[in-house]
Amino acid sequence: MNRIESAPTKIILITNYTCNLNCIYCDVKSLHKKYMTVDELKSMVYDLNKLGIKQIEIIGGEPFFNPNLIPLLSHCKKLHIETIVHSNSHIVTNFSENSLKYIDTFITCINGTSDIHDLIRGIKGNYERTLKTIELMVQLGITVVVDMILSRINFEFNYIDHVVSLSEKLNFKINFQKVFEHNLVSCKNNVSIKKLSINEKQRKECFEYILTNVKPNLLFNSFEYFQDMICSGASRFENCYMGKFSCVIDPLGNISKCYKYLRKKENPNGLIMGWNNAIKKIPDSESCYSCEYSSHIEDNYFYMKN
């Protein structure tokens, strides 16, 4: 049996696993380097748009290392599909402003002050490049969201305050996400995620501080998300909407209902089966009563309210 009763309205596309950073909590670039051709991507978007896709969220690796990114974004805009692009910001300013205007929402990451941020990202100078990229995106009229990945290295209030001050100055919203082991980043480097993860006391203090001291208009996260993070560190949905109203497509065209089920052998492949058939055959996986992915959590709350 399939979980899908109707086609999703949003796809999360992993364009490629290539990345130039060495984030201490991520080793996604250790995965394969293959990805779909520009014609395959355009055909995918065209077919899924006919099924009702209205939004595409593009992640990596680093999407700007995929030479097909800009043609893909241009094709999406011709079909009136909303585009969201995640990036580490390191090479974005190498691209023309005209090509960047295909982006509706730009999501990047700042993990604290310049020294702490660059330490966590594993490369010097990324902090400054990220600020310049944010300034450019805002200048172009593109909505900007900044992830702050909270770990034992940067969960202190002064680092949070620093990112909040940047939010007020540069005009972006903040998505607070605690670090945890998951299938998307496939962390296999020499740093244990358990050692990086904040403990229960730190998590509660951290998220209570944010909820109490940060202006709501600066937050990307919902009030429900903060409640979940404070109470248990995860969200629980008896009826998860992931796989029904949205799905994840990897660089080879395999489709899963969410990040948790990436690289499962039973995942259908749109390039092989055709996108219409593949979407309908997303496996009806067991119910998931504990989710730590902020993006999936917020999508679920959005679908519940709407």
Image (spheres, helix red, strand yellow):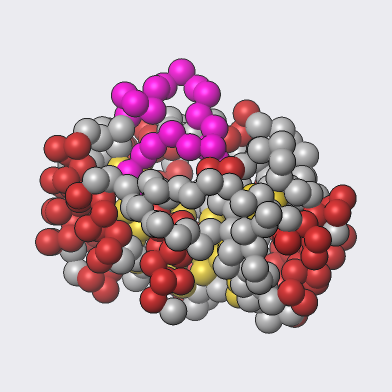
Q: Is residue 183 magenta?
A: yes
**Residue 21 on image: x %, y %:** 53, 36
Q: Is residue 77 left or right of residue 234?
A: right
Could you tell me which quadrant the C terminus lies in? Answer: bottom left
How many tags in the picture? 0
User: Which residue is drawn at the image coordinates 31% and 24% (left, top)?
Assistant: 195
Q: Is residue 179 magenta?
A: yes
**Residue 279 on image: x %, y %:** 73, 60
* Magenta segment boundaries in residue numbering: 177-196
User: Which residue is drawn at the image coordinates 78% and 49% (left, top)?
Assistant: 269
User: Which residue is drawn at the image coordinates 71% and 45% (left, top)?
Assistant: 267
Q: Nearer the viewer, residue 124 or 32?
A: 32
Q: Is residue 87 left or right of residue 206?
A: right
Residue placed furthest toward the top:
190
Please identify the dominant SS of the magenta region. loop
Could you tell me which quadrant the N terminus lies in? Answer: bottom right
**Residue 149 on image: x %, y %:** 35, 45
Q: Nearer the viewer, residue 68 or 178?
A: 178
Q: Is residue 175 left or right of residue 32?
A: left
User: Which residue is drawn at the image coordinates 87% and 50% (left, top)?
Assistant: 272
When asked about the image quadrant of residue 219, the answer is bottom left
Residue 101 seen anywhere in this rendered image of the structure: no
